[in-house]
Image (cartoon, rainbow, N blue to C red):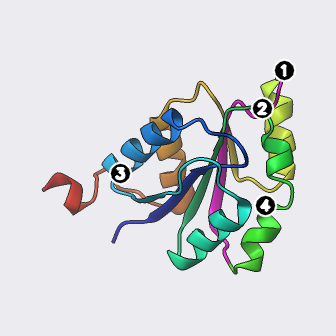
Amino acid sequence: MAQTVILGVIGSDAHVVGITILEQTFEAAGFDVVNLGVQTSQEEFASAAASHDAEAVLVSSLYGHAEQDCQGFHETLAGHETDAVTYIGGNLAVGQNDFAETRERFRRLGFDRVFDSETDPEEAVAALRQDLGIHSTEPDERVRA
């Protein structure tokens, strides 16, 4: 059975290209992807993660205000009894010069992994496989058929 991933762009951000690429990449890798689209609230992420019993929640943001949008995010997930792996990626901070510092700020917010906007989507797939203990690199049977 495929692992379920919730994907969306948080807050007021309307950048759709990145999540479309991620959706296609994760589906090709054998994951079930629920794409919430753009301008997604914390509540929408948490509700979808709970209703789909998701293993992972992937948050995207390119407009530079992700830190404000993600305050309390993990508390919202916990309120829905969701303990999914959480990733965030994109252009997370306006004027971001030191990504190591940005990564650390988002780790303190509770994200398991933090990616910059230049990350190859396959790197995120490999990280999620590792974090979920998926040892096979073969896509699931539905994808190969």
Q: Is residue 71 left or right of residue 35?
A: right
Q: Where is residue 44 in the image (x, y as percent from the top left)?
A: 64, 65
Q: Examine the rendering and report whether any part of residue 137 can be seen.
A: no
Between the residue at mark 3 and the residue at mark 1, the CA separation in whole angstroms equals 33 Å
Between the residue at mark 2 and the residue at mark 1, the CA separation in whole angstroms equals 8 Å
Residue receiving disc 1: 95
For the point 43% across and 47% down, the residue is 23
Question: SS at mark 1?
Answer: loop
Question: SS at mark 4?
Answer: helix
Question: SS at mark 3?
Answer: helix
Q: Which mark is residue 64?
A: 2
Look at label 1 and name its amino acid.
Gly
Look at label 2 and name its amino acid.
Gly
Q: Position of residue 92 (x, y in %)?
A: 75, 34
Residue receiving disc 3: 27
Residue receiving disc 4: 73
Q: Give the range drawn in magenta.
A: 82-95
Look at label 4 and name its amino acid.
Phe
Look at label 3 and name its amino acid.
Glu
Number of other residues with Cα within 10 Å of mark 3, as a class: few under 14, some 14 to 19, many 20 or more: some
Q: Does the magenta stretch include residue 70?
A: no
**To which quarter of the image does residue 51 belong?**
bottom right
Q: Is residue 99 left or right of residue 30?
A: right
